[in-house]
Amino acid sequence: MEISMRHIQALDCTLRDGGYCNDCHFGFENEKKIVNGLIEANIDIIECGFFMNTVKYDKNRTRFTSLDQVAQIIPKKRDGKIFVMLADHGKFVPEDLPEYDGTSIDGLRVAFHKKDRFAGLDDCLKVKEKGYKVFIQAMVSVSYTDEEFLDLIRRVNEVEPYAFYIVDSFGMMKKKDLTRLFYMVEHNLKDTIKIGFHSHNNMQLAYSNAQSLVHIQTGRDLIIDSSVYGMGRGAGNLNTELFVEYLNENADGNYELKPLLTIIDEILNGFYQRNPWGYSLPNYLSAAHNAHPNYAGYLDDKKTLTVEDMNEIFDMMDEEKRLSYDKDYIEELYLRYMATGQVQEAHKAELKENLAGKKVLLIAPGKSSADEKAKIISFAEREDVVPISINFDYPDAKTDYIFLSNLRRFRELDIEKRSKCIVTSNISADNVYLQTKYRDLLNDIEAVKDNAGLMALKFLMNNGVGTFYLAGFDGYAHDVSENYADSSMAFITRNAVLDAINRGMEIVLKQYSAITHIEFLTSPKYVMIQK
């Protein structure tokens, strides 16, 4: 059965929600191209970015501090489209808005968490009094009790905005949750107010939930949010191109797909290659635990945790801390989790004796460990050298020990090699040579606080080693194929994370080289010891 399109509007939030994937850095010309493409596609409502007074304006980013700035990317010929921005409560001053005159945006989406709902509604009323369409975004809608949500709806009726939104901030809303909230709104919201739905895709439910709303029996006008290519934080959003095609086929839609595909091909594909978004196990876990997706991003960027580890860390979180991202909190949880476990130092005296007066060759799994293996093999055979590999068993030369701080790498290791393993206490293991305290080996630079190579250096320095030669300590290229001698060890993460690791390694190596002798045996490409 076809549904009349007079009741359903598509709102595209690529330039706003998509900004979480590229720090809002679309580029001024790309911003205009995306807006024009969305107009050509006949998208009803176009969100142009964030409105906030807590940043410095950059023409190439979709974070705006005045309406004159955003007006530069809105064409004079609007073809009846509605243009909006999103403002988070506490990050803008409603009183600073000029009176609405039709030369810039038509409306403002005001977002707030439950704890700020009363002040947030005050913001909404002030925006409406300025003449703008107001969209009320009740973030993490499932965090409200029924009584709290009904009270919110009654207060929304007093504001009488353009639209009131059910917001699935963490992408964990099932159809039954959406239906329950929708009918609470449907039966209690004034008939003149549209109902909106904003979803994320952590559990791959954004598309099916949108379809459910399309076919729900209601005379109410609906607004459903999406972004081109699903561009958005973590698992991303409902895909605009998929959703409007569904509306064309099932709900009398009149959208053009070609301009959306052009946006993907000419603009968004490049951003995706540099910083991919979409479904992942970490994002699933954040949704399953009703937690902010940035927590999943933080844990995933560590590349030291198994899925089981991440799940246990989410289990450790306090309920009230899950809704808003607190970087200090998740870092402390991570360190606390990693610091648990036993210590086994029965061979510590023997190890010190074996290292006494020797040079240590530390072999990391960077690509130079294969490219320059002849040099490594020759050096490792010297009587005054103790070869130690890091997070893997070096295949081309015999090593005396293997240092491991990564549980994934430990699990991949041949069980027969455990007798020469030095592991940190976050790894639960029997029959290893030595197990040492994880927290004692950390440094102060966030991006490399528990980098395995730097932890190995600190451990060995603490045990009397005064001279180090480094092999395979290459740093990280943006091209993942350039990073490891064994391609199966490669991982994909954001370029900004890789750059931060390289800078962090240089800082810590410089600190350590001030108190001990450190020299590269193989040629690093992306990191060096700064003198």
Image: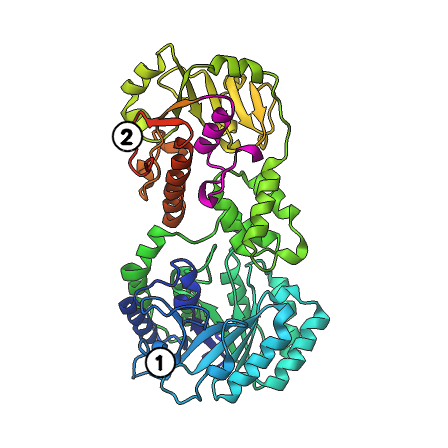
Mark 2 residue element: loop
Q: Return the residue found at the far right.
A: 147
Residue drawn at x 60%, y 85% is 159
For label 1, the residue is 68
| Residue 1 visible here | no
Image spot of residue 434 (x, y percent): 57, 21
Q: Earlier in the sequence, mark 2 or mark 1?
A: 1
Q: Return the residue found at the far top.
A: 383
Compared to residue 11, the image places residue 23 above or below, namely above
Q: Residues within 10 Å of mark 2 (few under 14, many from 20)?
A: some
For label 2, the residue is 523
Magenta stretch: give its range.
439-465
Coloration of the structure image: rainbow
Compared to residue 471, the image places residue 492 above or below, namely below
Which amino acid type corresponds to the residue marked 1 in the rendered image?
Asp
Q: Main secondary structure of the magenta part?
A: helix
